[in-house]
Image (cartoon, grey):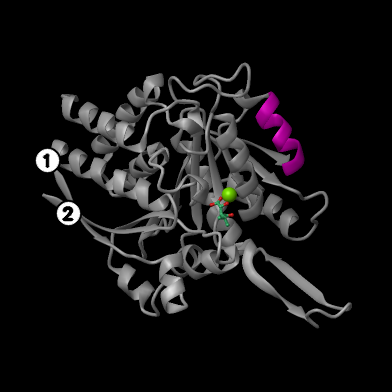
Amino acid sequence: MRQHRIAAIPGDGIGQEVIAAGLEVLEVLAKRDGGFSLSVESFDWGSDYYKKHGVMMPADGRERLQGFDAIYFGAVGAPDVPDHVTLWGLRLAICQSFDQYANVRPARILPGIESPLRHATAANLDWVIVRENSEGEYAGQGGRSHRGFPEEVATEVSIFTRAGVTRIMKFAFEMARSRPRKLLTVVTKSNAQRYGLVMWDDIAAEVALQYPDVTWDKMLVDAMTMRMVLKPETLDTIVATNLHADILSDLAAALVGSLGIAPTANLNPERQFPSMFEPIHGSAFDIMGKGIANPLGTFWTATLMLDHLGEKTASLRLMRAIERVTADPKLHTPDLGGKATTRAVTDAMIAILRGDNT
Ligand code: IPM
Ligand code: MG
C-alpha cells in the first residue's frame, strides 16, 4: 500500500472548517480506492498561535514540514493581526523556503455553476493560470526610511532573474503541452516595464523554440483583463508574474462563478521540498463559525494534491464527485446563491464517493 504523509495546516478563519471537511473526504476516498493511505499530522500554526507566541510558526517549523509529501493548507489572515505579518510569517515563508516557484490555478466552469459572463460555458472557458511564485513583485526587496517624516521614502522592488523566469516559462510550456489545445499566453506589461518584463518576453521566445508544438502569444496585462471577459474561448494556459497572475486569478475565479471553488497548488516541481495545496478564498472571517463555508475549493485543491502524489485515479474520482455536487443546486452554499451548509456538501460528497463503483 502506498502511504503519503500529509501536513495539514488549517490556519485561520474558515480554513479550519474547510480543511476538516477536506480531510474527511480524503479519508473516505483513500478507503474507497484501497491502493493508498494518508497519514496526516495537523499543525495549529496561524494567527491564534501568533497571539500566544509572537510568531506564526515555531522557529523549527520549516524543518518539521520538510519530511512530508505534501502540505494541505487552509488560509491565513485575521482581523486583529496585520496581513503582512500573517502572510510573510506563514504562507509566504513556506512557499519561499520550499522553493514552490510554480503556482497553478485552474479555472473552469463546473456543471450547474453559472458564470456572470453571458456566453461562458464549460466548453469555452477552461484555463490554467501559471503564476510565478518565488520572485517578481513578491520578492520582499525594499524598505522604508525616515519613517513618519515628510521625506519618508519606501521602495518595493520587483526582482526578475533569468533563472527564475526561465524555469517558470518551461513549466508553463510543459503545462500547455500537456493540455489538448497546446496553447499558451504569456502576460507582461513590457511596454511600460522595460527591463524585467522585456526580459520575460525575450526568455519566452527562447524557451518557445524548445516547444514547436505549442502555439503561444503575448498579451499586456491590461488588455488581458478584457480578453478574459470578452473572448474567454481564445485562452487556455496563461503564464504571468507573481502580482499580475494574482490579480488575473481573482478575475478568473469570479468568471467561473465563485472564489469559494477555486483551487491552488504551490509546486516545487523538482520535488526537493514538499509542495503546498490550498483553496484560494482565504480566511473569510465574516462567515467563520457559521458552517456555511464552501468546501469545494478545498476538495478541488485535494485533486491537485492527489495528482502530485501520483494518485490519478483517486484524483479523477474526486473531481467527478465535485462535479456531481455542483450540478445539484440544493448543494450550493451561499457564495453560489444557495442555502447548503459545509456539512451538507461534505456529506453529499461522501455519499457519492461511497456509491461510485467505477
Ligand atoms: C492569493 C492571495 C495572496 C497573494 C494574498 C493573501 C497575499 O491573494 O493567494 O492569491 O496575493 O498571494
Ligand atoms: Mg490573490
Tag 2 residue: 3
User: Residues at badges 1 and 2 in contact (C-beta under 8 Å)?
Assistant: no
Reply above or below: 70 against 305. below
Secondary structure at badge 2 equals strand
User: Where is residue 67, by image quadrant?
Assistant: bottom left
Report if residue 229 lies within the magenta region.
Answer: yes
Q: Which part of the image, by quadrant, shows the C terminus? A: top left
Q: Position of residue 188 (x, y in %)?
A: 71, 48
Q: Nearer the viewer, residue 82 or 306?
A: 82
Name the quadrant containing residue 233. Answer: top right
Measuring 61% from the left and 16% from the top, which residue is drawn there? 119
Q: Quadrant of residue 211?
A: top right
Label 1 secondary element: loop
Residue 203 is a magenta residue: no
In percent of the image, x 50 and y 48: which residue is there?
284
Image: magenta residue range? 221-230
- Circle 1 residue: 34
Q: With 240 as the anchor, is 56 left or right in this view?
A: left
For the residue marked with disc 1, what is the amino acid?
Answer: Gly
